[in-house]
Amino acid sequence: MPDVRRKIDVKGIVQGVGFRPFVYNLAISMGLSGSVLNNRLGVSIEIQGSETACREFLRALEENAPPTARIAQVNVADIPAVPGECGFKILHSDADGDGITLVSPDNDVCPDCLREMLDPADRRYRYPFINCTHCGPRYTIIRQTPYDRPFTSMANFKMCPDCQKEYDDPADRRFHAQPNACPVCGPALTLYDAEWKTAPSSDPIADVARLLGEGRLIAIKGIGGYHFACDAANEDAVEELRRRKLRKEKPFAVMSASVDDVRGYARVGPLEEKFLLSREKPITLLRRIPGRAVCDGIAPGLHEYGVFLPYTPVHHLLFASGAPTTLVMTSGNIADEPIVFDEAEMRGRLCGIADYHLTHNRPIVWRCDDSIVRVADGKPAFPRRSRGYVPSPVFLEKKLSPMLACGGDLKNVFCLANGETVFPGPHIGDLVNAEANRSFRESIAHFQRMFRILPERVAVDMHPGYFSSNYGRSLGLPVVEVQHHHAHIASVMAEHRLAGEVIGVALDGTGYGTDGTVWGGEVMVCGFSRFERRGYFPPLKLPGGDKAAKEPWRTAVAVLYEIFGEDLFDLHPKFVQAVGETKVKNVAAMLEADVNCPISNAAGRWFDAVSSILLIGHANSFEGQSPILLEGMADASVEKEFTFGIGADGMLEFENMMRELVCMAETQAGRIKGASMFHNTVARAIAESCSRVSHERGLKEVCLGGGVFQNLYLLERTLKLLREAGFTVYLPKQLPINDGGLALGQIAIAQGIGVE
Ligand code: ZN
Ligand code: ZN
Ligand code: FE
């Protein structure tokens, strides 16, 4: 049988992950000749040998690829055999043309490195910067592409002969591992005290493990920024951290040594376990088991915990050295600012928060927050897609012109697109302070350089005052203005490659509407090129404007005053008492005079109002707090619903429901029933609205978008009702359902994806 030759193009994250050595070893082991080289979108392989061996190679290529590789596509073509070829070569990369080079996200430490690190005979025993081609930091240490050591924050560390030998050997696990290092030549840890004076320590890891056990607060430099850590079971330490970090009640993420430790305080299903153990090591949202292992101060009053497992060598070493088995591991920042990744800033503004600082001399080039994942409808959902996932692209089917989409001002994520690739940026957070704004601008510039994309157009939210929108408008490029909720739905459509029109339900806390009011409770007919608003939540007044989002009792007063007028004082005395009579009176006066009471129909504000009316939550010390407490109160075994109306123009009518809720607020049993029935009613109202639209337009596909659907009770109930009514329902797959998904929708709309 004559030899055959195949050209195999592999697209995806296959660079900087040990893919070429893997291909080399695979080809050698099968007696194939040929070559491999990196190209713009992945690697290009040529193999030559027997038909059987070539087929076997292809199977193994996909099945046994290195753990951190992410293969998006494999194309195979027959090409003429090269007579007399022998050996298999790794060719120099062809990547410095004008194309896009994909960059790997940051990886956790791999099992091989972990084993070496805990082996007293290994030369990297207890070395906190151990890594190989299968693991270690990538995105956060890369200054520019191509991904070569001089362009990373490892540039200043010259490899010792032992490390260099590994680096040069194609058969070695550290062949071309750019961050390769060892105790002789690589970065090292230093322990500082509260005032950044060196704390004499022969073993910083052992000392920090002990200090954590003693209830101290420790700043730990990680992959994408600093964490503040303390013993999660130590109530005093947790309270002290809240005080110093100016973080009142927003939940802290916790890191446990193992899945078994997690089971001590939270429910872990099979898919959740998969996430906890996955290479990306995201924070996974889990249902809490009350009163166990961790103290209440972690997530006061909430029914969920954010949990992750160790992912850096330092984390593993701390647990192996006797640190408490569950640690608070929260972003190193103050209040709502972005996570701090720069040592100078830790020494400056954040000085005095931690008792000790465990830091090192490998600079973090780019900030990258921990990702957050949860299971919704039996599938993964990403409230935050950042470390471990960024900068992996999302592939769309249509050719895209070079374009930037700026996203929104809350939970900001931008997207950069070109060809068939969209690069969602890291989680930047809320663009409400100078540091976040700077991070937004710099990350966009970095992505443009890294992926060599020069946008020809820019898509922005149509909000007149968003920082992100005004940034986009200032670039001097043609601007596409996109309605917020249209973008939410288009994002889901793009991920599922839906074309034509669908029914979109977008529920969130705020989004600028085409009529200049604040929307956020929308049932729409959506295509990429246009949308129609066919149903909507009833508008309510927000006394005090932005203050209402922080103080749900204001919206509650607005709802009650609208229905009952002055009678509200007699009809719901417990509410008036809980909020304070003077405050209620003042807001009633604002409503009467219609001063500073903007209109909104955002679903999030209805959840706020109901939480307050049911005396569950009157304040949001973090976004969504009262609605989350309301969700936690709901009992899925309650099947009853309130009656509601739908007006001729699609407006939902909730007055009857509000009257009944007031009566139910009296007792705890009533509040549980009221919270459940409210959720059930909202789900029913959504399903009814969709059915009406479907009846008129014959549409049977529904896309759900907006942060309110992070409410699992509401989501599951809505899915059930929609499916019973014969709808096919789509949720985001890779991007957040909250505003973190907006930019993808903006790209899809601006590019008219799906519209031929
Ligand atoms: Zn490794
Ligand atoms: Zn070395
Ligand atoms: Fe939104």
Image (tube, rainbow, N blue to C red):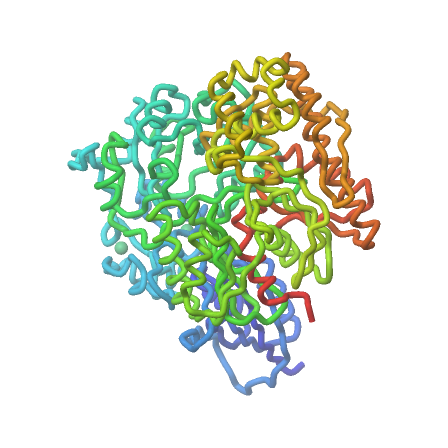
Estimate the x, y position of residue 89 in percent, counting from the top left: 45, 75
Quarter of the picture containing the N terminus is bottom right
Question: Is 740 or 569 nearer to us in this picture?
Answer: 569
Q: From what the image shows, is residue 689 above or below residue 179?
A: above
Q: Residue at x 29, y 62 (%)?
A: 164
Q: Residue at x 57, y 30 (%)?
A: 608
Q: Is residue 255 left or right of residue 62?
A: left
The part of the image, by quadrant, that contains residue 684 is: top right
Q: From what the image shows, is residue 71 above or below residue 44?
A: above
Estimate the x, y position of residue 703 in percent, counting from the top left: 69, 50
Estimate the x, y position of residue 224 in percent, counting from the top left: 37, 48
Q: From this viewpoint, which residue is outermost toward the bottom?
A: 83
Count of number-bearing discs: 0
Question: Is 201 or 422 nearer to us in this picture?
Answer: 422
Q: Is residue 698 left or right of residue 551?
A: right
Q: Residue at x 40, y 65 (%)?
A: 450
The part of the image, by quadrant, that contains residue 754 is: bottom right
Question: Is 233 or 448 nearer to us in this picture?
Answer: 448
> Is residue 25 at all visible to an observer of this figure?
no
Q: From what the image shows, is residue 361 above or below residue 481?
A: above
Q: Is residue 380 left or right of residue 217?
A: right
Q: From what the image shows, is residue 438 above or below residue 625?
A: below
Estimate the x, y position of residue 463 in percent, counting from the top left: 51, 53
Quarter of the picture containing the C terminus is bottom right
The part of the image, by quadrant, that contains residue 531 is: bottom right
Q: Residue at x 15, y 36 (%)?
A: 197
> Is residue 178 at all visible to an observer of this figure?
yes
